[in-house]
Image (cartoon, helix red, strand yellow):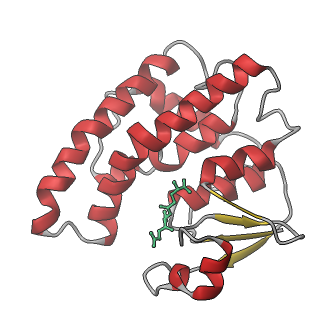
Amino acid sequence: MKIYGDTQSGNCYKIQLLCSLLQIEHQWLHLDILAGDTQQTTFLAKNTQGKIPLLELPDGRCISESNAILNYLAADSSLLPNDVFDLAKLQQWQFFEQYSHEPYIAVARFIAKYLGLPEDRRADYEAKHQGGYKALAVMESQLEKTPYLAGEELTTADISLYAYTHVADEGGFELNDYPAILTWLERIKSTPNYIGMG
Ligand SMILES: N[C@@H](CCC(=O)N[C@@H](CS)C(=O)NCC(=O)O)C(=O)O
């Protein structure tokens, strides 16, 4: 199978990390967003959204949306529970990631790291911090109770939220007031076959 992505993107890193943890063989195809690779007609034919990551199966079928790709690839592994309640709990965290975490923490990181924090984006950057810290507080409260977000076991919910939380400092977030998150980051980092971003 082929995975189209950019190693600097947290959404793409989710897939790289999962493939490493589960030792899934794949072909990685690098796309340069800033050079317009995702807007080329050949790529748009595979994903009309023009976004990465994108998974292409050997028969040509494609899946976009990082969390959908994670759950597809993790089927039948310990990272994706079969129990309906446990699966819904995991998805609860993945929807939270897309609506309440990534739009703040990933975007603040993008403004600071890739745009160089231009003056005309400063107000936007600061507004992202309020929402980002709110998301971190929600995670902290869960991780004070359980070692992983969806309970006792590592699941794809942790991979979804690890991707941008572990580089939140690049978006100006200070994690020292979130000790349970810091411990969780270390726990994930020590998982066999872990790989870092980039
Ligand atoms: N919700 C999507 C977000 C994907 C996304 O925004 N990808 C960015 C890179 S992190 C992208 O491809 N941007 C290119 C563009 O918008 O043209 C996911 O989780 O996969």
Residue 108 image-quadrant placement: bottom left
The residue nearer to you, when weighing 147 against 94, is 94
Residue pictured at 82% horizontal, 48% vertical: 22
Residue pictured at 18% horizontal, 46% vertical: 127
Q: Position of residue 107 (x, y in %)?
A: 34, 56
Image vertical order of residue 54 relative to residue 98, above or below: below
Q: Is residue 76 left or right of residue 196?
A: right
Location of the C terminus (image quadrant): bottom right
Label count reads: 0
Q: Is residue 23 left or right of residue 168?
A: right
The residue nearer to you, when weighing 52 against 164, is 52
Q: Position of residue 137 (x, y in %)?
A: 36, 25
Residue 116 image-quadrant placement: bottom left
Image vertical order of residue 73 relative to residue 2, above or below: above
Residue 31 image-quadrant placement: bottom right
Residue pictured at 86% horizontal, 63% vertical: 25
Q: Position of residue 164 (x, y in %)?
A: 47, 49
Q: Position of residue 62 (x, y in %)?
A: 74, 65
Q: Is residue 139 left or right of residue 81?
A: left
Q: Is residue 132 left or right of residue 138?
A: left
Residue ranking furthest to the top:
145
Residue pictured at 46% horizontal, 87% vertical: 35
Location of the N terminus (image quadrant): bottom right
